[in-house]
Amino acid sequence: MTKGLSADQVFPIALLKNIERLTYDQLVFYLEETMVYRTFCNIGFADKIPSRSSLAPLMKSISPEVWEDLQVITVNIPEAKKIDSGKKVYKKLWKFRAGVAGLISWLKRVFSLDECSWKSHRSYKSYV
């Protein structure tokens, strides 16, 4: 239920909805499935996620002036300053990940690390 949501939770949820341009269904889905979003919105692991029907009145309780400020902060300013949308960063991170995976693959081939020779914790302890 939303009775337990504080302003510290409602504002990040509204911000997330605005930044990602999510519908209420998508917002609930991402809050349920993504720990990063839950952490950002100050919703604990064991806390219940608010339903779609309870999120809509919460978002409507936020004044239009606040929504306008959110729009300026999250959309207009980055566009005016030509801040990257994230695609460039994503490509760089993808290439970095591919490089790391290639290095790990090379190390495995060079040192014959295809599989672990320790079949259990007991055999590991006997090696150490």
Image (spheres, rainbow, N blue to C red):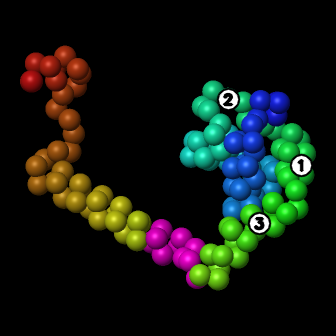
Q: Amino acid at mark 3?
A: Asp
Of helix, strand and loop, which one carries label 1?
loop
Q: Quadrant of the N terminus?
A: top right
> Mark 2 sits on what residue?
47
Of helix, strand and loop, which one carries label 3?
helix
Q: Residue at x 75, y 42 (%)?
A: 7
Instruction: Give the magenta range.
Output: 82-91
Visible residue check, residue 22: yes
Q: Residue at x 13, y 47 (%)?
A: 112
Q: Is residue 52 left or right of residue 70?
A: right
In the rendered view, tell whether residue 24 sits above or below residue 103. above
> Mark 1 sits on what residue?
61
Query: x, y percentage for residue 78?
Result: 62, 75
Q: Which residue is more in the foreground, 69 or 24?
A: 69
Q: Residue at x 69, y 61 (%)?
A: 20
The span from disc 2 to disc 1 (Cα, nearest Å) is: 22 Å
- Point out the frontmost of discs 2 and 3: 3
Q: Amino acid at mark 1?
A: Ser
Q: Residue at x 81, y 67 (%)?
A: 68
Quarter of image, res 84: bottom right
In the rendered view, tell whether residue 7 sits above or below residue 16. above
Q: Is residue 118 left or right of residue 32?
A: left
> Mark 3 sits on what residue?
69
Q: Quadrant of the C terminus?
A: top left
The span from disc 2 to disc 3 (Cα, nearest Å) is: 29 Å
Which numbered disc, 2 or 3, marks the residue that appears first in the sequence?
2
Crowdedness of circle 3 by 10 Å Cα count: few (<14), some, many (20+)? few
Q: Is residue 65 magenta?
A: no
The span from disc 3 to disc 1 (Cα, nearest Å) is: 15 Å
Query: x, y percentage for residue 74?
Result: 68, 67
